Image: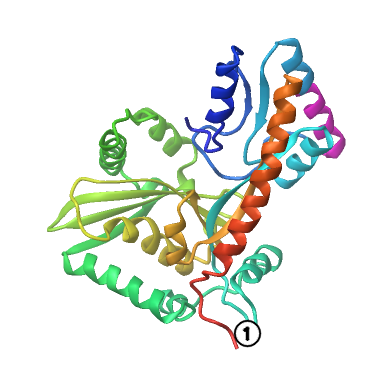
């Protein structure tokens, strides 16, 4: 739990053969499927030493395996050079990038990453870039929320009050309990994050008849300035009342409108979810690295990853054919 790269099948296979999969070594940020630095090193040589040291430590500790999740490109390269196996998964990201004439969604995403976004002027300009049916559906969904009497307010950093955090946590906890789980994170965690990194948090609160009924929490990158984050990340949401399409408004349309208004280049919607493509979040590959101590299982997993990787490529091609953007002349 909290890893977002699922290896339960590997663990079950170990158990079926009378082997212990746990404990395993994990290099990751818990509950955070956001790519970033996992090896704290100043250069490639240092990263290579870290990877070598990690593998040696796992052998000495007699751990079953080592897993580095959602690493930065340079981390993944160091792991591959160090003999670890690579595994791809798919996330869905939105880019604040006006499609250029003749470009497709995939090339627009790549251009945004390489050159920086040519941002949308406003939410209507973003809608204008979509195909007619996707544009119509988004407008219908937003209209349902508005006609239900729901309005939104947002707060960032120190403008998020303790009462706002308390309400958010009620929503967060309810989402987990509705699925039969206890919430992973305690209220104190969010308080410490608010105290330590206040400008890294953006909170949307939905209200009806003056009462808060739902909320969504967005994390903001600290790579850029506090005024202009480079990226936003959808993290948690919850609702105390059911309103048709409220989830889409709270988790996608409100954050996207905020990103456009504040010049944020990218919004990452989190792990999984093909439905996000209808909201113009496009498929992006993320990579993890894995080492298994048991030679036979390492060989079996390597063959599995080859098959899975081919399937991921086909899946990405299939998704690209379903682009929500209108064809560019």
Q: In this view of the protein, which residue sits in the foreground, 225 or 203? A: 203
Give the farthest residue toward the front.
17
| Label 1 crowd bin: few (<14), some (14–19), many (20+), radius 10 Å | few
At a point 17% along the width and 69% down the height, the residue shown is 147
At a point 39% along the width and 35% down the height, the residue shown is 190
Above or below 9: residue 209: below
Position of residue 56 in the picture relative to residue 9 (left or right): right
Position of residue 104 in the picture relative to residue 1 (left or right): right
Asked whether residue 250 appears in the rendered view, the answer is yes
Q: Which residues are magenta?
A: 42-54
Q: Was residue 43 drawn as part of the magenta stretch in this picture?
A: yes
Give the farthest residue toward the bottom.
329
Q: Was residue 123 drawn as part of the magenta stretch in this picture?
A: no
Q: Which residue is mark 1?
A: 101
Q: Main secondary structure of the magenta part?
A: helix
Image location (x, y in percent) of residue 28: 60, 32
Image location (x, y in percent) of residue 304: 67, 37
At a point 27% along the width and 33% down the height, the residue shown is 177
For mark 1, give the secondary structure.
Answer: loop
At a point 53% along the width and 34% down the height, the residue shown is 3
Above or below 88: residue 105: below
């Amino acid at each position: 739990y909290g890893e977002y790269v699922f290896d339960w099948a590997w663990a079950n296979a170990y158990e079926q053969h009378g082997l212990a999969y746990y404990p395993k070594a994990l290099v990751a940020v818990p509950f955070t499927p956001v790519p970033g630095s996992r090896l704290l090193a100043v250069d490639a040589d240092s990263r290579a030493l870290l990877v070598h040291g990690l593998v040696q430590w796992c052998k000495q500790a007699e751990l079953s395996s080592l897993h580095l999740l959602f690493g930065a490109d340079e981390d993944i390269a160091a792991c591959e050079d160090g003999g670890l196996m690579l595994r791809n998964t798919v996330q869905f990201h939105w880019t604040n990038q006006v499609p250029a004439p003749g470009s497709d969604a995939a090339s627009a995403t790549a251009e945004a990453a390489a050159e920086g976004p040519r941002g949308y002027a406003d939410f209507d300009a973003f809608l204008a870039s979509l195909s007619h049916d996707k544009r119509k559906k988004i407008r219908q969904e937003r209209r349902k929320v508005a006609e239900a009497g729901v309005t939104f307010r947002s707060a960032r950093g120190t403008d998020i009050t303790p009462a706002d955090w308390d309400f958010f946590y009620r929503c967060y906890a309810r989402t987990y309990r509705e699925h039969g789980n206890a919430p992973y994170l305690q209220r104190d965690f969010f308080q410490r994050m608010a105290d330590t990194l206040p400008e890294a948090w953006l909170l949307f609160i939905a209200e009806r008849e003056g009462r808060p009924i739902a909320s969504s929490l967005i994390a903001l990158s600290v790579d850029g300035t506090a005024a202009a984050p480079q990226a936003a990340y959808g993290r948690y949401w919850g609702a105390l009342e059911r309103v048709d399409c409220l989830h889409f408004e709270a988790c996608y349309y409100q954050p996207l409108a905020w990103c456009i208004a504040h010049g944020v280049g990218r919004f990452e919607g989190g792990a999984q979810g093909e439905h996000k493509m209808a909201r113009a979040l496009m498929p992006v590959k993320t990579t993890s690295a894995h080492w298994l101590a048991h030679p036979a299982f390492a060989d079996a997993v390597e063959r599995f990853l080859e098959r899975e990787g081919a399937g991921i490529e086909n899946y990405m091609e299939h998704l690209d054919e379903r682009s929500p953007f209108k064809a560019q002349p």
